Image (cartoon, rainbow, N blue to C red):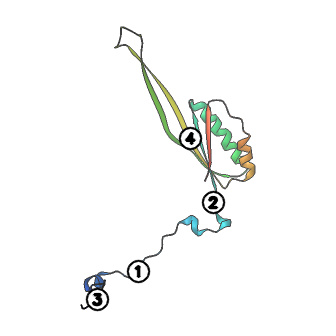
Amino acid sequence: MPTIKTTTESHESASTAKPAANKSPRVKKAATKGAEGEVSQLRIRIRAYESKILDSSLKQIMDTAARYDVVVHGPVPLPTEIKKYTVNRSSFIDKNSREQFEMRVHKRLIDIINPNPKVIEALRNMSLPSGVNIDVKMM
């Protein structure tokens, strides 16, 4: 039985193939920097029911960061989360009579670029008003 050799490249595909020299490898910017050039970032997300209390706590955080000469991006206002609740006014007869309540959660975002340990310690020891929720993430 004779063996038949097949080639994987046809004449049509060889003429339409593009040279690979034009393509450059895709490299992320963070990967090109060395270990000493890495940029660390502290992302602070603040939530509160009242916008005035939220703004006062933001001012405290911004003043603390400015005291230690750190680059700060923000505050960035995020969309307000609105939760609506509808309840009956009476328990038995009036189905058409209802009350509506809503809770608004105001949110802000602050990025601190290259935080030093003194800034992190100062932010950790800061006393903020009740009703303010803070999420801190190191990126």
- Vertical comparison of 45 with 23: above or below: above
Q: Give the residue type at disc 1.
A: Ala
Q: Which mark is residue 108?
A: 4
Q: Which mark is residue 110?
A: none
Mark found first going from the N terminus, 2 or 4: 2
Mark found first going from the N terminus, 1 or 3: 3
Left or right, 102 with reference to 53: left
Residue under pointer 3 = 5
Report how far apart the C-alphas of labels 2 and 1 lie in the structure. Answer: 33 Å
Q: Quadrant of the N terminus?
A: bottom left
Q: Nearer the viewer, mark 1 or mark 3?
A: 3
Q: Residues within 10 Å of mark 1 (few under 14, many from 20)?
A: few
Secondary element at image label 1: helix
Within the image, what quadrant is residue 113 found in? bottom right
Report how far apart the C-alphas of labels 2 and 4 lie in the structure. Answer: 22 Å
At 30% from the left edge and 86% from the top edge, which residue is drawn? 7
Mark found first going from the N terminus, 1 or 4: 1
Residue under pointer 1 = 20
Secondary element at image label 4: strand
Within the image, what quadrant is residue 84 found in? top left
Q: Which mark is residue 39?
A: 2
* Residue 59 at x, y percent in the picture: 65, 39
Report how far apart the C-alphas of labels 4 and 3 lie in the structure. Answer: 68 Å
Q: Residues within 10 Å of mark 4 (few under 14, many from 20)?
A: many
